[in-house]
Amino acid sequence: MKKKWKGWLCLCLAFAVSFAILPAAVSADNQFAGLRLYTGFAKVASDMFVSGDTGTYGVDVNEHCPAGYKKDGYRLWRLDEGNYTVASRWVSDNEQEWAAYLTGYYAPEHVMLAPNWTPEYSAEPITSEDPTVVIGDGSAQDRGDFYYQWMRERKVVDIGNYYDGSKQVKALGSVNAVYNSEYRKWVAGKEQPYIEVRFSLQRGDVVTVKDIAGGTDPQNYFSGYLKTPNGSACLETYDHKNEVFYATAPSGGECILHMQNNLSPNSLQAAVTVSRYEAEDGEAGSKTYSGEDGTYCCKISYIRDGSQISFFTNAVTINKNGSGEDDPKEYAVTKGAKPEHGSFAAKINGKEIDKALPGQTVTVETYPFAGYKTQAITYRKTEEAIGGPITVPMGGDGNGCFVMPKYDVTVEVSFCKEQPEVKPSQPPKVEIRLEGSNYIWDSFMGKVSFDIMANKARRFHIKVSDPENDLDDSAVKYYLANGSLFLGNKDYSPEEIENAVGGRWIDKADTVDLKADGRYVLYVKASDKAGNTTYANSQGIVIDTKAPVVFGVKDQGKYYGTTKFMVSDVYLGTVSVDGKKVEPDKGVYAIAPDNAPHTIEATDLAGNKASCKVFVYETWVRDGIKKSGKYTLQKGVAYKLGKGKWKIAGDSAIYRGGTMIYVPDSGDYNFRKQ
């Protein structure tokens, strides 16, 4: 019978061509230099791109499309310090949407925008009933620059399930990830925000990543690359709407598959498969397969302007011997030793069988006893009693399927005791908000700083919630610590805070007021019925309602000669004279005499202010004019002349010493003693 193939589309671009273009353009021609958006150890925000020193969109872009490709939007590339590709993601042509694509994208190296080139053509899925390659709408597939080569699939494996036989690709291990056999996915751990799986590949092997979990629309958050000893290839899709990612190994050896969730670290699951194809003799040049039974895909290549572009169709299993040919050979399906705690049956189309044709799908239905579940399903070549079992992937119902090979098989099933699923209890959530500000805290901070200042009373709002609704209000408490707890300027643990607070925790309140001047830190703890306790605290808050004190001078006071004053305030910020910031000398500020009024203003870090106005005169204003020379006099002010007789330049009159004089206009006057 014919086997209807419902496999995934294994369309794989010739990445070596397209990827060779971008690194060369970046490092050699620097054609994309005008598109660099941001460099720095931070997350990209919407205001970090398009500036005078980083260039603008669309400037100096290499718009010359490579032969055989067409432009489909842009790609946001992440490069390392050597300008090698690390990851990429598709973005649209609409510049108005770029901010949304970029905001929050983690970019520890270089982030650049470049045109996204996709193949001009792609192949429709082929079927076992009609294994004919159709390019696009079929109108271009007979052109002389298209070449077809059927490739036999030698190895197709889920790299989480393998054995040491020659027919499988073996996973060598992973970094920060575990393999979930139930869902057949790799799951990110907590140590690093990525998954790395290591395995040995041959040149041309196709690595496929699909069934990606960790958010909606993987095109907007997922990226990765395949690193080999002699080069790297990014995980790419043949269409930006597709959620299946591919990379072809440019060289063989021990390789690393790197996968990451760019927007939500440590939140990633993905299924990974490896496919290996080898050319089938005698089938080159044909767009329809008509050879021996097996699993095949077709490699399509076309040459344009001297460049060759290649991609693969999906894989299809052709099984003519199982579709009604005379005298098809059947092979035995034998049950192994009777398992404990359950039974099983081998079926085809719902009927139990003891023989099957090669290529037929054999379903192993399992029937565990109450309190047990299916542990493993395997089959092996019957004549090989020792070693070589092949693990059959299981579904959520404990059943499994395998394709009947061309030899007798023995099927074995094992069961294990079913453990009740224990969901981890979720701890309560605590939120502390400072009224009248944007400050919100929801976690424990061991070290606090008193950088938040206020010059009036403030209020904390406390909100405690529990996902499982098993929170007892009596188990929610707070403690308002003063600054003396933190004199050691150290990192505190929750245990140290508990020891310091002792029995002084206060039952939950929705608000906590800070009325008196002082330094405060609010601690909140919430415990649920399962025994989970969550600690959270604010940063240090300083309430300072007192203005600085200026002493050494009085408001509206008159002073002669250099006038000195001091300012007292624990949280003193700035001191200014006539609006200009001044610095003290050993704590003392000075104003030089200039016969003019001056305004002193002192401001502390909380915003409290103190000011006073003083008049600073030269000493001769008080003691009188005793020497010949030029003096600056103000209209309406009385000045005293020293002993003797005096003349003023421009005035023929002689003035007697010891008298008070006035001038008609403010200005400089030249006095001469006679």
Image (cartoon, rainbow, N blue to C red):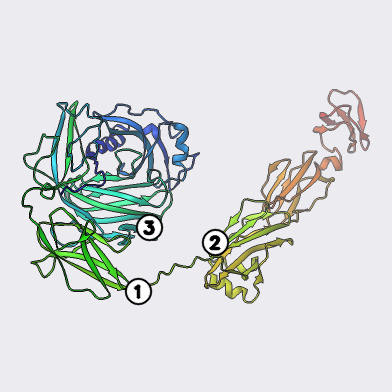
Number of numbered discs present?
Answer: 3
Residue closer to the observer: 141 or 573:
141
Residue 650 lies in what quarter of the image? top right
Q: Amino acid at mark 2?
A: Ser
User: Few, some or many C-alpha atoms within 10 Å of disc 1 (few <14, some 14-19, many ≥20)?
Assistant: few
> Which residue is denoted by mark 1 in the rendering?
371
**Residue 232: x %, y % from top left:** 25, 45
> Which residue is denoted by mark 2 in the rendering?
443
> Which residue is denoted by mark 3 in the rendering?
192
- Identify the element where label 1 is drawn: loop
Mark-to-mark CA distance, 1 and 2: 41 Å
**Residue 339: x %, y % from top left:** 22, 74
Dot placed on the residue nearer the N-terminal end, 3 or 2: 3
The vertical placement of 219 against 544, above or below, is above
The vertical placement of 234 against 547, above or below, is above
**Residue 444: x %, y % from top left:** 54, 63
Q: Do callouts 1 and 3 mark residues in contact (Cβ within 8 Å)?
A: no
Q: Amino acid at mark 1?
A: Gly
Residue 23 lies in what quarter of the image? top left
Mark-to-mark CA distance, 3 and 2: 21 Å
- Identify the element where label 2 is drawn: loop
Residue plotted at (86% across, 42% down):
622
